[in-house]
Amino acid sequence: MLSLRTVQWKEGKVIMVNQRKLPHELVFAEFDEVTQVANAIRTMVVRGAPAIGAAAALGLALAARRSRALTRDELLLDLRRAEKLLEETRPTAVNLTWALTRILSKAESYTGSVEGLKKAVLEEALTITDEDLSVNKQIVEHGSLLIEDGDVVLTHCNAGVLATVGYGTAQGVILQAHRQGKNIKVYPTCTAPLFQGARITMFELMREGVEAYLIADTAAGHVIRNQGVTKVLVGADRILGDGTTYNKIGTYQLAVLAARHGVPFYVVAPTSTVDMITKREAVVIEERPSTEVTRIGDISIAPRGAKAYNPAFDETPPELITAIVTEKGVIEPPFRQNLEKMMSGRPTGGEMDS
Ligand code: MRU
């Protein structure tokens, strides 16, 4: 079992698995400045919505620790500057904003000393990272109940241990079902252009001995149609109040294919990914450098001067989603009513509207 912490705080530093080095090296990188953490999020040393939420939280704790502020107001100013820097790194994953807002609102209501405020910021950041572990543990328990012996699962990108502080979400469900002794077969997509599926999902599946066959993204239709796929499981970077889901580019086409072939399509994510406030029109889909498409690593694969369009995420409409799995249970349509109930703490699961 891959029982490491992707993101952690150790002796005044942030330690993170350097995911750019996977699968060939499993190494950790150390950070002691918030600017370094922001850069690590932007360049995807750390990636996956819950992991970047935790990284940003600890980044804010670093900003507090390094601040020379003499008053509470000066420290709050430094924290707001750090918040802005971190927030701009990756706009689609709502966990980032969620973690930063949570810490800033705690900081703003704190009335004690500068040192006390620094401590409070660190405590909240550590709580966020610890909670991610316990929440994901619950998610994989709920989600694994959906997986049956003999299932053939297709997954996209990496929503595993390394996309979170630990345990994972969609991929965590797959790993948990395997640990429970269920006989499953997995088809992870490579996930061009950055190959999180090939590099990271495949790394996690192979370490745990899950029967897995990596496929090109372009093979998904053929595989769903001909290889007996029984379920598609993906993570999410943002889920709106009506269930509209933003996830790695390529998710939408998988949802369309799944619907075409009557294959259940599950979105698996913590409630920190649920955004009941933002409207569709206001969601920013991150666009990444065109060189991620025209090159693979250092090798150019397109004619010199080729232009490229590189959206990092896409939008899957709720009608293509069979159910959403969170730490609070499995939610079926109608998503608007059921997400509202779940987020307001009203009963979930079997008591959902249908
Ligand atoms: O660009 P990435 O690698 O950060 O994208 C990751 C995804 O799209 C994941 O599916 C999502 O963040 C959920 S991770 C539990």
Image (spheres, helix red, strand yellow):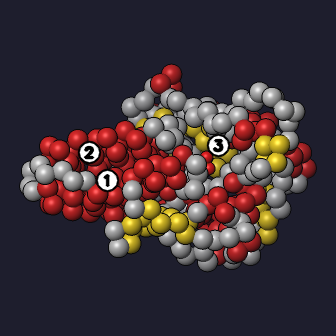
What's under tag 3, amino acid-wise?
A: Lys
The reply to whether discs 1 and 3 touch (Cβ–Cβ < 8 Å) is no
Does mark 3's beta carbon lie closer than 8 Å to ligand 1?
Answer: yes
Q: Earlier in the sequence, mark 1 or mark 3?
A: 1
Residue 123 on image: x %, y %: 26, 63
User: In this orientation, which residue lies closer to the viewer: 191 or 9?
Assistant: 9
Asked if residue 3 can be seen in this view, the reply is yes
- In which image quadrant can residue 177 be found? bottom right
Circles 2 and 1: CB distance less than 8 Å? yes
Q: Mark 3 near mark 2, Cβ–Cβ under 8 Å?
A: no
Mark 1 — residue? Answer: 63
Along the polypeptide, which appears first: circle 2 or circle 1?
A: 1
Q: Which mark is residue 78?
A: 2
What is the x, y in percent for residue 234? 64, 50
**Residue at the spot 47% in from the left edge and 66% down from the top edge:** 30
Tell me which numbered mark, 3 or 2, is placed earlier along the sequence: 2
Residue 248 disc label: 3
For the residue with label 2, is its CB less than 8 Å from the closest atom of ligand 1? no
Q: Is residue 169 visible?
A: no
Question: For the point 37% across and 38% down, which residue is it?
Answer: 84
Q: Residues within 10 Å of mark 2 (few under 14, many from 20)?
A: some
Residue at far top of view: 281
Instruction: Identify the residue at image location x=82%, y=58%.
Output: 214
Left or right placement of residue 320 versus residue 125 in this view: right
